[in-house]
Image: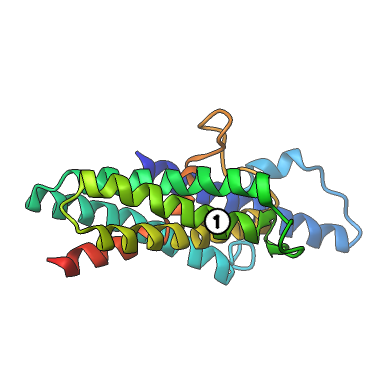
Amino acid sequence: MIGLRGCYEIKRLWCLRNKAVLIEKLQARGLQPKILPFSQTSSHSTPAYTRLNRLDLVFSFAFITLIVSLIALQQLIWQREQYGVLFFVLFASQFNDIAQYLCGRLLGHKLFKRGLAPIISPNKSIEGALFGSMLAAILATLLGIWLTPFNWWICLLAAYGLAVSGIAGDLLESAFKRQHGVKDTGTMLAGHGGVLDRVDSLLIGVPLFTLFYWLLG
């Protein structure tokens, strides 16, 4: 379900971008097309109209890798009967989002005037990313000691890795949205945007954690 909905949202944003490019080209020639008739235009009409840039391809590859990694992680968990590992990954991701938001609101731009990525995501602060990831890693480690068979230092390493990779995934999705000129990737989840807005912190973290978990044996 997540995979299908996520693919739909990516495809929809591709179409929005391609329509905008076509309309800009027509306007540059002195034409003023109405927007509505172009809403039904096929996104595959011409090669130039459907050309994807590198960021589209990178984000799409990251999302497909996420889905494949979730399936692989689920199989590994079932084989090893370590069901708490999946909850650890999901909770660590949510802790990271909440902790960074709270630390950003409380400490944002008080120590560092420059934002974390002002062009991609102006509201993200270095303080929120730094202290939020540390707080999330500590909370996730405490939970991981209880949920997983890992030692505390493995839990800490995995939790901090998920926190840092969560920031990278969030920035990747923010860049993807900014390129297409939208605030949210969809409207499926009221108040939270689309599916991609909710899984952005997992884009890079889950594939890396799946590899880490597999190497642990």
Residue 20 lies left or right of residue 136; in this view the side is right
Q: How many marks?
A: 1
Q: Nearer the viewer, residue 186 or 163?
A: 163
Q: Dot 1, crowdedness within 10 Å: few (<14), some or many (≥20)?
A: some
Residue 73 sits in quarter: bottom left
Residue 27 lies left or right of residue 113; in this view the side is right
Residue plotted at (71% across, 45% down): 38
Residue plotted at (61% across, 63% down): 46
Q: Is residue 138 above or below residue 193?
A: below
Pick out the residue farthest to the right.
Answer: 30
Can the viewer see residue 61? yes
Residue plotted at (18% across, 70% down): 215
Residue 15 x, y percent position in the rendering: 60, 51
Residue 39 x, y percent position in the rendering: 67, 42
Residue plotted at (91% across, 59% down): 30
Q: Quadrant of the N terminus?
A: top left
Q: Nearer the viewer, residue 189 or 211?
A: 211
Residue 192 sits in quarter: top right
Residue 56 lies left or right of residue 201; in this view the side is right
> Which amino acid type corresponds to the residue marked 1 in the rendered image?
Phe
Q: Nearer the viewer, residue 98 or 212?
A: 98
- Pointer 1 residue: 131
Residue 27 x, y percent position in the rendering: 86, 57
Q: Is residue 55 above or below residue 201?
A: below
Residue 140 x, y percent position in the rendering: 36, 49
Q: Is residue 103 above or below residue 190?
A: below
Q: Nearer the viewer, residue 138 or 73?
A: 138
